[in-house]
Image: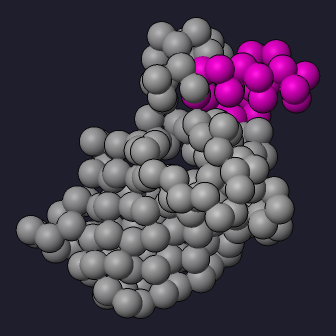
Amino acid sequence: MLKYEIGTQLKEIRHQAGWSLTRAAKETGVSKAMLGQIERNESSPTMSTLWKISTGFHKPLSLFVDNLLVGVDDDKVRSTHTTFTSHKQGLKAKILFPFDPRFGFEVFAIKLSPEQTHLSEAHDKGVFEHITVVSGQMEVCIKGRWKKLKAGDVLRFTADQSHGYRNMNKTIHAEFHNLIYYS
């Protein structure tokens, strides 16, 4: 189901932008062949590829997978079910709140495996990330320097630069919430 949602949303957003696959490949840094495979539901993008696509289109990541939840009434309880896994980088991300233009943000719950690092490319100008460490310890790389964080720590930074997350612990997962604000 998730592969279908991503392919359908990608095709719709690309058509809304009036972009060909060639233009989308140029703007996102993802090959034309890969974009076509995603749109035809022949391939599921990795987390890194999906971030490249969303950044290239200047759209929040959750719009590509959870668009049906935008505009849901504020007082209704819902289950969080959309999860991405990047086995290569030992990262699982679950969408807690998809992007809603009324508020300008999306929220993810992220679990980083022991001894794993996840590097992220720069987002658009004006994008901020707000990290809240829920459990374990982790480090966040900003401007080439790693900052240590533990459960209960919070950090806000401009995300229009390369950045990263890592868990140096050999046995314990690091869990954090990431609120991404789009100005």
**Res. 61 in view:** no
Residue at 76% from the left image edge and 39% from the top image edge: 57
| Residue projecting furthest to the left | 171
- Tell me which secondary structure the magenta stretch mostly adopts: helix
80 up-or-down from 162: above or below: above
Query: Can you give x and y, in whole percent of width and height, for residue 44 in the image?
Result: 45, 24
Q: Is residue 152 in view?
A: yes
Indicate left or right for 50 with 159 as reference.
left
180 displayed left or right of 71: left
Residue 22 is covered by the magenta coloring: yes
Residue 12 within the segment the image draws in magenta:
yes
Picture colour scheme: one colour
The residue sitting at 27% across, 71% down in the picture is 174
Q: In this view, does 94 lie above or below 102?
A: above
Q: Residue 134, located in which quarter of the rendered image?
A: bottom left
Quarter holding the C terminus is: bottom right
Of 76 and 141, the residue lying toward us: 76
In the rendered structure, which segment of residues is drawn in magenta?
Answer: 6-30
Query: What residue is at 83 percent from the left and 62 percent from the top?
Result: 102
Q: How many marks?
A: 0
Can you tell which quarter of the image residue 166 is in? Answer: bottom left
Percent across and percent down for residue 171 are 9, 68
Counting from the top left corner in percent of width and height, residue 101 is at 81, 56
Compared to residue 80, the image places residue 45 above or below, namely above
Where is residue 17? Give x, y as percent.
Answer: 88, 29
